[in-house]
Image (cartoon, rainbow, N blue to C red):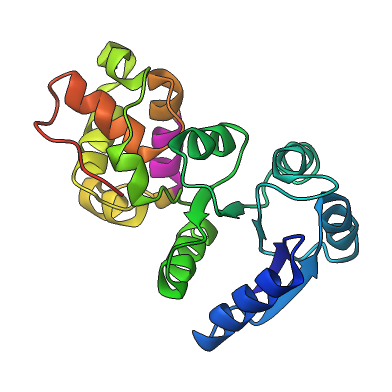
Amino acid sequence: MKLLLVDDHPLVRAGVVAALQSLGAPELILEASDGVAAMDCLAQHPDVDAVLMDLRMAGMAGMALLEQLKRHYPLLPSLVLSSSEDPADVRRVLKAGARGYCPKSASPATLLAALTLVLGGEIYVPPLMAMAPEAGPAESNLSGLTPRQREVLQELCNSKSNKEIARELGMEEKTVKGHVSAIFKALGVVHRLQAVEAARAAGMVSQALSY
């Protein structure tokens, strides 16, 4: 696994590298100090598996970098690692295309778990999002979902991963991913927690689950 770490503080980069390597992953960590350097690095290393990036940086900051990644590397997953624990920042980066958000206050094990989830095609949402009120999902309408999509949504409410849902419903994992994307689009949400909240608001489940 090859990871690109983008942060404008050398000490922070050193700490993240040490933390990840102490847990045995990833095999190679490239470093960049801002978005411009990150894009240059990606041009030289097209085999990078994921980008781990700060949100607020000198030079090209996180949001601008997310826009560039979405435009030039739409299939490359990115995980934001930020000191901000504002749920609004979480929602903002997920809408911009990030596959996850991990606060810098998280443990190395949590960071590695989030990175593993993102590399597996999932979206990582920190527990702090479970405590944040959100507008939108509660107003979403489930009537536009197909019966199969409703089954998938129910499994999301049961905290099942895409792989587990595929096994439970007897379908390919890539088909599940397609259903999940369609569910997000229909409900106007960007991650699983919001989808679960929408299902709860519509009476599909009695209690929202956190991820």
Query: Quick check: is 178 in the magenta stretch?
Result: yes
Query: Quick check: is 143 in the magenta stretch?
Result: no
Point out residue 30 in the picture as x, y percentages from the top left corner: 77, 72
Would you say 201 lies left or right of 26 here?
Answer: left
Pick whichever, 104 or 97, lies toward us. Answer: 104
The residue positioned 46% from the left and 61% from the top of the image is 114
Point out residue 77 in the picture as x, y percentages from the top left corner: 62, 52
Point out residue 55 in the picture as x, y percentages from the top left corner: 65, 47
Would you say 151 lies left or right of 75 here?
Answer: left
Name the residue furthest left: 206
The residue positioned 42% from the left and 74% from the top of the image is 109
Q: What range is drawn magenta here? A: 174-181
**How many numbered discs sit on the rendered protein?**
0
Would you say 114 lies left or right of 135 here?
Answer: right
Would you say 164 lies left or right of 88 here?
Answer: left
Point out residue 71 in the picture as x, y percentages from the top left corner: 78, 36
The residue positioned 18% from the left and 18% from the top of the image is 202
186 relative to 105, above or below:
above
Pick whichever, 47 or 174, lies toward us. Answer: 47
Dominant SS in magenta: helix
Question: In the picture, which quadrant includes the N terminus?
Answer: bottom right
9 relative to 60, above or below:
below
